[in-house]
Amino acid sequence: MSAALSPAAPAARPAAEVVAAPPAAEPYRRFRLFPTAWFAGIHIACFAAFFVGISWTAVAVCVGLYVVRMFAITAGYHRYFSHRAYDTSRPFAFLLGSVGATAFQKGPIWWASVHRLHHRASDGPEDAHSPLKRGFWWAHVGWILASTHSDTDEERVRDWMRLPEIRLLDRFHWVPPVLLGALLFFGGNALAAAYPSLHTSGAQLLVWGMAISTVLVYHGSWCVNSALHLWGKRRFATPDQSRNNGWVALFTFGEGWHNNHHRWPASERQGFYPGEHDFSHAVLKALSWVRLVWNLKTPPPEILEEGRRSAASAG
Ligand SMILES: [Zn+2]
Ligand SMILES: [Zn+2]
């Protein structure tokens, strides 16, 4: 189990100390060719919308795939695979992981390995993506393109290494997005043939459902690493510089309550207080009613009280 799940309140590390972390030892020149070409390519592919056009079907597919995949990343890759903040069956975990993989963020085991390190070493020298260490763009995307954290530290994810189906998914993480791409292309062409009035096509659904939707999911989820350690309010005096930001919470389905999350990472819900909207929590709660997930972990009363006191003293 990760140190991230430790209930003890760590001593607050002053912001000045965090900012004064050692400078980059592994700079941008270590960018890997394939991820960098992929990153550039998928952004450029968005401009193909000018050639394939737009339709209500394409917009619905783009938004629908954003919602489903942002949920799979936040509720699946993050809250389940990284923090085990609730329990579920092995088939449903495999499904969550497979849908998460369609967002092109590698496999759930690699994701959890890097994320558990983030909680253990937040904004310190070992953190893969601290904006205080190497700037906004490094935290947002640079670290993903570099070679520094491209491998999985299996020691940090021994729990998942024991499950063959999750290991298989992690190893062949490119299969679900390729299948999704094929479904969009051939499904779009079939739709165009059956319902010409929809004004769609396989190429159009590929551009809107794969390129544009994936780029939106990318930047949405990457904001958690970059913006949420820079901009927002700090209710809890955590040793890192995590922030709560309601705007980011809107499009990241609750992940914007990042300072709450750093204070108690084991909690399934990240919006701790009334008014802190958390869409992924709402969906998980609904899934718990039909017993697809269970044992949703909550922050202990003393942590909630600590946050209330802190908010009251801040006026
Ligand atoms: Zn963080
Ligand atoms: Zn986390």
Image: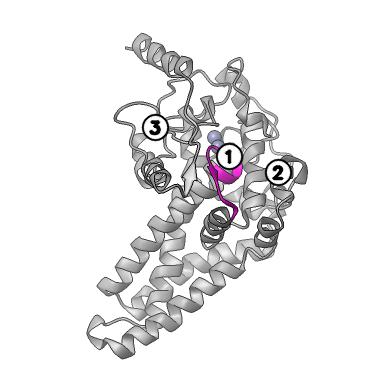
Asked if 210 appears above or below 267 in the picture, the reply is below
Mark 2 residue type: Asp
Lateral position of residue 226 relative to residue 272, left or right: right
Residue 121 in sight in this render? no
Numbered disc in front, either 2 or 3: 2
- Magenta-colored stretch includes residue 264: no
Q: Is mark 1 within 8 Å of ligand 2?
A: no
Mark 2–mark 1 Cα distance, whole angstroms, equals 10 Å
Mark 3–mark 1 Cα distance, whole angstroms, equals 17 Å
Residue 294 in sight in this render? yes
Mark 3 residue type: Gly
Asked if 27 appears above or below 125 in the picture, the reply is below
Crowding at label 2, few (<14), some or many (≥20) Cα neighbours within 10 Å?
Answer: few
Q: Is mark 3 within 8 Å of ligand 2?
A: no
- Residue 271, labelled with which disc? 3
- Residue 84, labelled with which disc? 1
Determine which quarter of the picture holds residue 205. bottom left
Q: Secondary structure at mark 2?
A: helix
